[in-house]
Image (cartoon, rainbow, N blue to C red):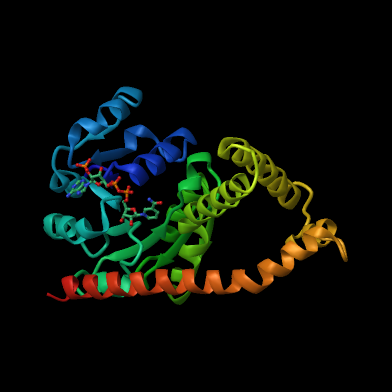
Amino acid sequence: MNKMKIGFIGYGSMGSMILNGFLDSNSISAKDIIVSNRTISKLDDLKEKYPEIEISLKNMDLAKKCNPIFLFVNTGEVKNVLDEIKEHLTKDTHIIHISAGLILKTIEKSFSFKITQIIPSLTSELKEGVSLVCHNGKVNLSEKKFVEILFSSISQVKVVREEDLDISTDLTSCSPAFMAFIFREFADIGAARSELTEKEAEEMVLQTLLGTVKLLTEKKMSFEEIISRVATKGGITEEGIKSLETDLPLVFDKLFQSTFNKREKIKRDLDHKYNV
Ligand SMILES: NC(=O)c1ccc[n+]([C@@H]2O[C@H](COP(=O)([O-])OP(=O)(O)OC[C@H]3O[C@@H](n4cnc5c(N)ncnc54)[C@H](OP(=O)(O)O)[C@@H]3O)[C@@H](O)[C@H]2O)c1
């Protein structure tokens, strides 16, 4: 029997980032993988860059020849794809998906495969950030290691308990958007209260943000240290910090509540879908 290949279904925003990250970092070899995507023409550039990659026109053909299989399709499509390919999978097939809200026990209602849920982050575009990992009880040690090593080539890997996944997702995967929004707002309100253009203010904030991240990571300063070094007692920054102390906990509490509510709704809808 031929050696099984590694399958990748779905080559959109996340799928292309992750797969190209694995290939660029030589974590996997192009000759060992098969890729499929609903719109097949989206794979032309990949095939041109890595001619050894096998492209499959049908998910089913990929499923016959692959284990593990990575599903990078939209959340609502995961069940359709699994239904489509399930007759070619065995109890040893390891399915890895990246859909937030699609928890392990929901998939387990309809399928008995080895399942890993990964929550990636856009920051993997630069091989930075955190990928969250949750395995179900059927995934063995070497399969866990295989996935974790792969994702460590594009990010830090953090294995989390399923009950911590939601908040961890907000902190890692959703947060590039939250941070971009917060800092743009900070700059734009600053601009509105001055003669600065939004572009000038955003540039100031961006450079300061870069410097602050370097203080935290390269200089190993803590958040606390930075706050106390800048917000000296009785000074102007201290007043700004006091105002944040009053208002920010409420803002973040509301944010976590809103993502929780939305996620619960998605989970309920998916649970219903996988129950039938
Ligand atoms: N964006 C983020 O930061 C982020 C973070 C964590 C997790 N996620 C999760 O990642 C998943 C994918 O998100 P995305 O942003 O990459 O979406 P996307 O850009 O829409 O990509 C989805 C890809 O899957 C393909 N596809 C859909 N149905 C298919 C099928 N039946 N067979 C084969 N391919 C199929 C689509 O093909 P077409 O080319 O025909 O459209 C598309 O290329 C979602 O579940 C999302 O929750 C996203």
Could you say which quadrant of the image residue 166 lies in? bottom left
Name above or below for residue 231 compared with residue 185.
below
Left or right position of 113 against 83 = right
Specify whether residue 44 is in view.
yes
Q: Nearer the viewer, residue 4 or 49?
A: 49
Q: Residue at x 35, y 24 (%)?
A: 49
The image position of residue 45, as x and y in percent, is 30, 26
The image position of residue 2, as x and y in percent, is 23, 42
Left or right position of 160 against 76 = right
- Pick the quarter of the image with the C terminus: bottom left
**Residue found farthest to the right:** 233
Specify whether residue 224 is in view.
no
Name above or below for residue 131 compared with residue 102.
above
Q: Residue at x 28, y 46 (%)?
A: 7
- Pick the quarter of the image with the N terminus: top left
Q: Residue at x 40, y 41 (%)?
A: 17
The image position of residue 204, as x and y in percent, is 67, 40
Q: Residue at x 47, y 68 (%)?
A: 255
The image position of residue 65, as x and y in percent, is 21, 45
Left or right position of 169 against 231 = left
Name above or below for residue 132 compared with residue 154.
below
Callout count = 0
Q: Nearer the viewer, residue 210 or 234?
A: 234
